[in-house]
Each structure stands twice: as C-alpha cells, then as structure tokens.
Image (tube, rainbow, N blue to C red):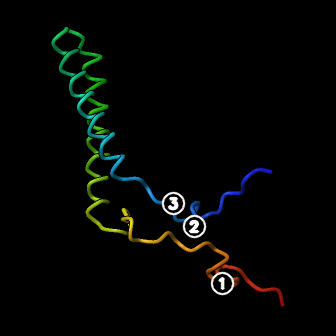
Amino acid sequence: MPMRLIRTGDEPIHARSPLRMRLGLATWGLLWTLGGAVAFAVAGRPGWAAACGALAVVTLIDLVLVIRHIRQGPHYQPGRDVPPYAPIAERGRSHGRRRAP
C-alpha cells in the first residue's frame, strides 16, 4: 500500500519560493556569465562575449529582485518559525464559493 503524503498548505495558490537558494544560484550564475564575457572578449569572440554579457544583465536583474523580496520580510521568505498556510478545507467551506440555494 503506497504511503499518502499529507499536504501542509495550498501550494498552488500560495507557493513559497526558496529565495536564499535562488540568491546563491543567481550569484553563481552572475560570476560565470561575467567570467565568460571577459574570457570571450580576451579570446577575440565578440559575439559570445555579448551573449554572456546579456545573460549577466538578466542574472543581475534576478539577483536584485531576489534581494528585494528577501528584504520585504516573511511574506516572501518565511523562516522556520512561520507555519505553512492553512489548506483550503480548513479555511472554511464558503471561502470563494457560492452556496447552492
């Protein structure tokens, strides 16, 4: 008999983003794209250097947005002491639904 997983929240509606992981990955990606841009520029490959530079800009924008969300507090990055959202069934049956007459 397969084990049934118990849901701890209504993830499709209020999914939480692992922002600290995204911060690390964006930082790592920024380092690699900047390094690639410099390496391709030194090697005389301006097209590849421009492509890496464009990716570096996109990665930098993502990095800025992640830092902004982290600074906005537990709404975007809850800590271990913040409980998950209550499942829809626990919020009340009439939440967002009309009752039949």
> Do tag 3 and tag 1 residues touch (Cβ < 8 Å)?
no
* Residue located at (66% from left, 57% from top): 5
Q: Amino acid at mark 3?
A: Ala
| Marks 1, 2: nearer the viewer | 2
Is residue 81 or residue 85 the one in the foreground?
Answer: 81
Q: Earlier in the sequence, mark 1 or mark 2?
A: 2
Q: Which residue is mark 1?
A: 92
Q: How many C-alpha atoms fall within 10 Å of the one at disc 2: few (<14), some, or many (≥20)?
A: some
Q: Which residue is mark 3?
A: 15
Q: Residue at x 31, y 24 (%)?
A: 51
The kind of residue tagged 1 is Gly
In space, the residues marked 1 and 2 are separated at their CA atoms by: 14 Å
Residue 74 in the image: x percent, y percent?
35, 68
Q: Position of residue 97 (x, y in %)?
A: 70, 80
Residue 40, quarter of picture:
top left
Report x, y in % for residue 8.
58, 66
Q: Which residue is mark 2?
A: 9
Q: Position of residue 57 (x, y in %)?
A: 26, 37
Question: Helix, strand or loop at disc 3?
Answer: loop
10 up-or-down from 35: above or below = below
Residue that appears at 84% across and 91% down: 101
Q: CA distance from mark 3 to mark 1?
A: 20 Å
Task: Give the secondary structure at mark 2.
Answer: loop
